[in-house]
Image: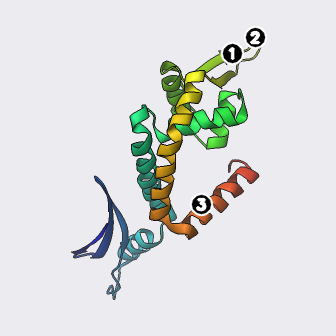
Amino acid sequence: MPFDLATPNGHWRFLTLGRRSCICNNMSDTDNSPSDYDAAVSRISEQCIAVRMRMLNRVITAVYDDAVRPLGLTAGQSNILVMVERLGNPRQGDVGKLLYMEKSTLSRNVERLRQNGWLEVTEHAGDRARYLNATPSGRDVIEQSLPLWESAQIRAREIIGPAGEQGLRDAADALWRAGAPT
């Protein structure tokens, strides 16, 4: 539920989801003579794509994390497990590239999935790569997660709306088609 807050630096609208609050935007239009510093702060706070993407990432990730938490999963771990099944015994590095995930984050989550008995990690002779395979328990947890994921999808769609969903799909699809930016 949004709420507004007036401050000496303008009028701010906040979005609250459960325990989390995120600044959406500064709604001030009364700055008559900004200094260069004030103009920079104003421009960045009002136009920065990164802050909005990071905010949305935290909010939407929390929706999915909350949904799959009863299974002992996080949204990121669920994504890894599903991608492994989708690809069929992929190299760990390939999963990381497709999900644009840092190596340390991927390794930490793969280890947790392995410890929970949901993922098997193997190495082939003469190949330094690690190969990932979902175990029968991992396949079961994917199946159990579906109704929880579906409820998270509904909530995420409520938050970002149809145009936001389509914009995200288009941007992600373009990244996957083009490969990782350098």
SS at badge 3: helix
Q: Which amino acid does the dot numbered 3 rest on?
A: Leu
Q: Position of residue 48 (x, y in %)?
A: 48, 66
Q: CA distance from mark 1 to mark 3?
A: 35 Å
Label annotation for residue 125: 2
Residue contact between numbered discs 1 and 3, judged by CB atoms under 8 Å: no
Packing grade of label 3 (10 A; few <14, some 14-19, many >=20) is: few
Packing grade of label 2 (10 A; few <14, some 14-19, many >=20) is: few
Q: CA distance from mark 3 to mark 2?
A: 40 Å
Q: Report which residue position mark 3 lands on.
A: 168
In the displayed structure, does residue 73 sit left or right of residue 127?
left
Q: Which amino acid does the dot numbered 1 rest on?
A: Glu
Q: Position of residue 39 (x, y in %)?
A: 40, 76
Residue contact between numbered discs 2 and 1, judged by CB atoms under 8 Å: yes
- Residue 11 falls in which quadrant of the image? bottom left
Depth check: give the residue in front, 75 or 149. Answer: 149
Q: Report which residue position mark 1 lands on.
A: 123
The type of colouring in the image is rainbow
SS at badge 2: loop
